Amino acid sequence: MARPPATDQAFLREVDEELRRDQVAAAARRWGLGAAIAIVAALLLFGGWLYWQHRREQAAGVEGEQLAAAYDQINAGSIPQATTSLAALAQAEGKGTRAMALMTQGDLLLKKNDVRGAVAKFAAVAGDASYGQPFRDLATLRQTAIEFDTLPPQQVIERLRPLAVPGSPWFGSAGEMTAIAYLRQNRRDLSGKLFGQIARADDVPETIRQRAVQMAGGMGVDAAPSAAVSPAGATPTP
């Protein structure tokens, strides 16, 4: 739909303002001055909320474009420029943009073998409850993968416990690290069971499933897909 001319917009605003004045005046006559003041206050609050929503959506759009540009810089090998862009985006108003910028900073630090710096970036997202849970979960997974060889097995198990369950979007990676941690504790029963669950999960990446099949088979766990369950009361077909 074409945008109305500026003169039409001004006319519509005048009509809207007149309508609002008429509505407030009618309310004042019917309910009294106090009710009219309350209506005006409510209209002001609602208008402020709409403006805040509009500004937030505008900021999110701009920040999203800036983040995409930073990724383009990384893909083009312009790491110094990307580093500068990400430093600004790590202070962005939008929490999602800020979380992604911090984690991307962590990935770049890891490429430079700055393990401590990378861990700090992922930990900053994982430990901040103001970020959305998907961002925190991804940061937890990345942080644990980086630290895996230096962490006590029990710490790996406890940290990844909410993610290493069937149905979790991170079940494959989190479950694999947890199963290896069990194995390091010589808890082969729990390790084999978890590898078997990963091998039978349809929503786990194929490479992880193949490794899980091999690990489960090596521990004597049947990793074949589960048989179909017959409806309640039905007699299984031989």
Image: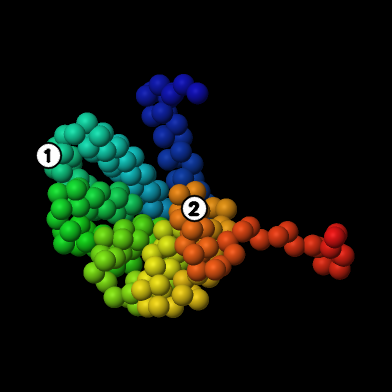
Instruction: Tell me the residue that label 2 is attached to.
Output: 210
**Label 1 neighbourhood size at 10 Å, few (<14), some (14-19), many (20+)?**
few
Residue 5 placement (x, y as % from top left): 40, 21
| Residue ID at (40%, 78%) | 186
| Residue ID at (40%, 72%) | 183
Q: Quadrant of residue 60?
A: top left
Instruction: Tell me the residue that label 1 is attached to.
Output: 80
| Residue ID at (42%, 40%) | 17
The answer to whether residue 131 of the structure is visible from this angle is: no
Horizontal side of residue 96 vs 218, given as left or right: left
Image position of 213 with respect to 152: above or below: above
Residue 43 placement (x, y as % from top left): 43, 53
- Cα–Cα gap, marks 2 and 1: 39 Å
- In primary-sequence order, the first of circles 2 and 1 is 1
Q: Secondary structure at mark 2?
A: helix
Q: Quadrant of residue 197?
A: bottom right
Image position of 154 with respect to 82: above or below: below
